[in-house]
Image (cartoon, grey):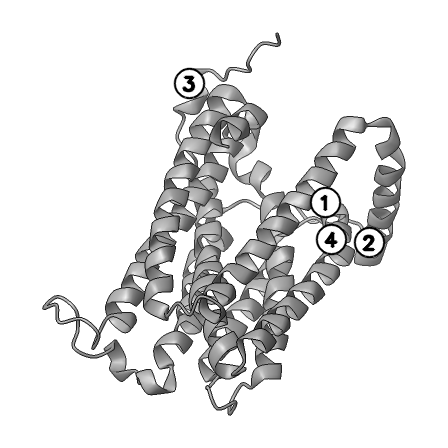
Amino acid sequence: MSATPMIPSSITSERLPLGAVSWSLFEAGRNPFVMLVTIYVFMPYFSTIMVGDPIKGQALVAAYGQWVGWIVALTAPLLGASIDRIGPRKPLLLVSTAVMAALMISLWWARPDGSGLGITGVVVAAVVINVLFGYTEVLHNAMLAQAAGQRLAHKASGLGLALSNAISVMVLIFVLWAFALPGKVPWNWIPAEPLFGLNSAAHEPERIVGPIAGMLFLIGALPLFLFTPDMARSNSPIGQALSEGVGALRGMVGKLRGHRDMSIFLCARMLYVDAMTAVLLFSGVYAAGVMHWDTLTMLGYGVLLSIFAALGGILGSKLDAALGPKTAYRSKC
């Protein structure tokens, strides 16, 4: 029986530097988009109200998810293979963050009658946001070792997951209190009408989550650009870095035959991420279109799931440190 990898308590109790905490906050700021827009509020509104036919709405969501999957699958590995040769991650990460936040905010103009940002506009915005989301994952993860070091990477990663879900819980509760519950329950601590004069008949409470997600993303990203260390600029031109990245990818694929464990891991991760993405894309639109859940029910469901996910992020970090990642994953399952 192989020995369980143990990490000294002095390492597990060591405090994260500011750059590593800032790295985790970026993840936390990005996650509300998934909760508010992709799963629980906006996309169910888009597929059922804007499109007007839940089946056609689900088909459009499936189509944009497929486009995103193909684009990211064909381009993200090249970005990952090339970024170390390019050097700094922050410039491209800054551009991606700005474009994503602007497109999230633009979802406010996705009116139910199709005026403003129409159905095609929403689909295009969703494709661009999610492709850039994949790119930011590559760039953000590439900064982890620089931000936290190998010894504290598990703590920064666990903190990012825990903060992501904790902030999502708070945001979901705020949206419940401020927009979903007003006018529907006679409780004194709930506003009589949606805050900011939002019009429920125009589905403004559902549309406002786009700007909320965009602003939270910008706020969460700011510390990373200020405090997280970046790689030094290399002397390689971008064209040369991309060419060398292509060569590195070809070399890696050629070596997979001799590395069975690596091949199994990559295939397993591909299937796992694909299944997880399908759940994220369709759980909300399915619940709204087939089970006829309203926004209030969806938000309550999201709060419960996010609470358990936040606890899982904290527990997962501790199990990773004590047992190792593979054993920790088995114990959580």
- Which tag, 3 or 2, sits closer to the chain's start? 3
Residue lying at 59% horizontally and 59% vertically, measured from the top left? 133
Disc 2 marks which amino acid?
Leu
Q: Is residue 148 visible?
A: yes
Q: Are marks 1 and 3 in contact (CB under 8 Å)?
A: no
Q: Residue 203 at what x, y percent from top left?
A: 38, 82
Residue lying at 36% horizontally and 69% vertically, measured from the top left? 295
SS category of the residue bearing label 1: helix
- Which tag, 1 or 3, sits closer to the chain's start? 3
Q: Is residue 96 left or right of residue 78?
A: left
Disc 4 marks which amino acid?
Leu
Q: Is residue 74 left or right of residue 59?
A: right
Quadrant placement of the N terminus: top right
Q: Residues within 10 Å of mark 1 (few under 14, many from 20)?
A: some
Please give the residue where the numbered disc 2 appears in the rendered image.
Answer: 242
- Which tag, 2 or 1, sits closer to the chain's start? 1
Please give the residue where the numbered disc 1 appears in the rendered image.
Answer: 84
Gap in Å between the C-alphas at discs 1 and 3?
31 Å
Q: Is residue 185 left or right of residue 222?
A: left
Gap in Å between the C-alphas at discs 4 and 2?
8 Å
* Residue 145 figure quarter: top right
| Between 226 and 193, the one nearer to me in the picture | 193
Please give the residue where the numbered disc 3 appears in the rendered image.
Answer: 10
Residue 79 - label = 4
